[in-house]
Image (cartoon, rainbow, N blue to C red):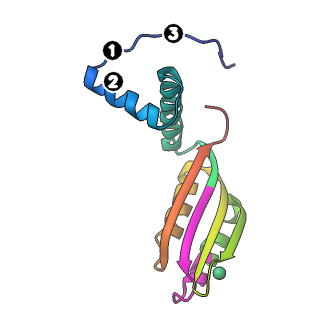
Amino acid sequence: MQDSSLKRFGVSMEGGLLRKFDHLIKQRGYENRSEAVRDLIRDSLIQQSWEDNEQIVAGSILLFYNHHQRNLLEELMHIQHSMHDYILATTHLHLDHDNCLEIIIVRGKAKDIRQLSHNLTSLKGVDYGKFTVAPVGKV
Ligand code: NI
């Protein structure tokens, strides 16, 4: 069970580092240091669970590509069908005459989703790939 009661702890650091931190949190619009530190800790925990291969994660793989690239559509389709268990939905937008944007919603073990993302974004003709996931379950 999660303990949601607030605890206080002291942090010591060099003045220069603290000034930089204060500047950063002001830029990002945090009300105070506590709020910023909480977000940093949550980010670190998400990062750590992502490094755990067995953790179930969900998120999206974003692909920009030119659909005229030889064999690219066939390869994208082949990879997605071979890993269909991990794909919840795919949205394809025709951006202009040449370029497509594809958003693939995924869910599965971190190691499998990482592999799927790598297989897709490393294809020749994919100009840009962005991979965003979070663990399923509260961190
Ligand atoms: Ni298209």
Pointers 2 and 1 in contact (C-beta within 8 Å): no
* Mark 2 lies within 8 Å of ligand 1 (Cβ measured): no
Identify the amino acid type marked 1.
Ser
The number of numbered badges drawn on the structure is: 3
**Does the magenta portion include 37?**
no
Residue wearing tag 2? 18
Pointers 3 and 1 in contact (C-beta within 8 Å): no
| Magenta-colored span | 60-76
Residue wearing tag 1? 12
Q: Residue at x 26, y 25 (%)?
A: 16
Element type at marker 3?
loop
> For the residues marked 3 and 2, what is the alpha-carbon distance in whole angstroms?
18 Å
Q: Is residue 116 left or right of residue 14?
A: right
Answer above or below: position of 18 versus 91.
above
Counting residues from the start of the chain, the first of labels 3 and 2 encountered is 3
Along the line of sight, the residue nearer the viewer: 16 or 47: 16
> For the residues marked 2 and 1, what is the alpha-carbon distance in whole angstroms?
9 Å
Counting residues from the start of the chain, the first of labels 2 and 1 encountered is 1
Ligand 1 quarter of the rendering? bottom right
| Placement of the C terminus among the 4 image quadrants | top right
**Does the magenta portion include 70?**
yes
Residue 3, given in percent of the width and then of the height, sits at 65, 15
Element type at marker 1?
loop
Mark 1, Cα crowd under 10 Å, few <14 / some 14-19 / many 20+, is few
Residue 34, given in percent of the width and then of the height, sits at 50, 20
Camera-nearest label, 3 or 2: 2
Identify the amino acid type marked 2.
Leu
Identify the amino acid type marked 3.
Arg
Residue 75, given in percent of the width and then of the height, sits at 57, 80
Element type at marker 2?
helix
Residue wearing tag 3? 8
